[in-house]
Image (cartoon, rainbow, N blue to C red):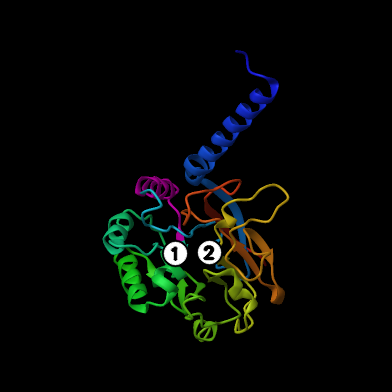
Amino acid sequence: MPFTRRQLLRLTAAAAGAAAGFYTWRIEPHLLEFVHRALPIRSLPRDLNGRTLVQISDIHVGPRVDDDYLLDAFARVRALDPDIVAVTGDFVSHHDGMFEQMDRVYAHFPRGRIATVGILGNHDYGAGWSHPEIALRVAGIAESHGITILRNQILDVAGLQVAGMDDLWARRFDPSAAFARFDPSRAALALSHNPDTVDLPGWAGYTGWVLAGHTHGGQCKAPFLPPPLLPVRNRRYTRGEFALDGGRSMYISRGLGHLIRVRFNVRPEVTVFELSSSG
C-alpha cells in the first residue's frame, strides 16, 4: 500500500528530527572551532606585539566529555605553538576517579612558550562548589603539568600583568586581593571564569580585557531565541565580545567541553588571540 501524503510528511519530519537529534548529540559537541581574533592591549610591551595567546575554557574532564576529543584538541593547540596559553576555569567535572582522570588527560595539555596560566571555575570546587580541598587538589594537578594557577593573584608574563580571579560561585572571588599589586600604567589582562563578576565592585580602575567562560555559549541557540542553558544573572552575557563600563571589554568563550552532551548552533571553541598594542 502506497503512503499517503500525510504519512510521508510524518515520516519526513520524524527522520529530520532524528537527524537533528543525532547531530546535536554526536556531531556538534565535538565540532571544535578555532576562533582567531585580535586582542589590543594598552601599553603592551614591544616584545609581546604579534604574539599569540590561546584561551581554553570549560574543559570539563569527566564522564560526559570524551578523553580522545580533548587530547585531539590539545594536540591541535600544541601545533599552533602558542606563546601564552590561558585556561579560564572548569578543568574538571566532579565525579569518582576525577583526580586520576585529570592527571592522565592534563599530562598532554599544551603549554605556551612564554607562560601557561589558569584560574579555577565553580566545578573545580566539587559538589555544591563548596569543597576547597578539592579545588586545592585540582590546582595541584594542573600545576604539576605546567599550568600556573592564579587565585586572586597577578602574574607578570614578560611585562604583561595577568590578573587571575578565583571563582564567584565558590565565594572565592576577591578582586581587591587580585589587584593589590596592580600597576594601572602597565599592560594588563584579567581572567575571570564567571562573566557576572564584571558587574561587581572591586576592579580597582582596571580598564583592559577580561577573558571569561562558564556559559558554554548557552550550548544550544535556536534562531531568534535566547539560549535555554545560561548560568548567569546578567542574561546578555552569552558568548563573544562585550563592551563594559569603565573602559573594559570582555570576551566569553563558548568552551571546549560540556556538562550535557548537546550543542546546537553553539560549537565548542578554542580562541586564538593575536596580541597588539592599542596605543
Q: How many marks?
A: 2
Q: Amino acid at mark 2?
A: His
From what the image shows, is residue 198 above or below residue 10? below
Closer-to-camera residue (89/163): 89
Q: Residue at x 49, y 43 (%)?
A: 25
| Whether label 1 touches label 2, CB < 8 Å | yes
Write down the quadrant of residue 279 in the picture: bottom right
- Seen in the image, is 102 located left or right of residue 243? left
First-in-chain label (1 vs 2): 1
- Mark 2 nearby-residue class (10 Å; few <14, some 14–19, many ≥20): many
Q: Which region of the structure is painted magenta?
A: 67-85
From what the image shows, is residue 45 above or below residue 35? below
Q: Amino acid at mark 1?
A: Asp
- Find disc 2 in the rendering and name its residue: 214
The N terminus lies in which quarter of the figure?
Answer: top right
State whether the magenta stretch is mostly helix, strand or loop. helix
- Find disc 1 in the rendering and name its residue: 90
Can you name the residue that lies furthest to the top here?
1
Please tell me whether mark 1 sits on a helix, a strand or a loop.
loop
Write down the quadrant of residue 115 in the picture: bottom left
Q: Residue at x 57, y 72 (%)?
A: 187
The answer to whether residue 39 of the structure is visible from this angle is yes
Q: Position of residue 222 (x, y in %)?
A: 66, 48
From what the image shows, is residue 33 above or below residue 271? above
The answer to whether residue 150 of the structure is visible from this angle is no
Q: Which mark is residue 186?
A: none
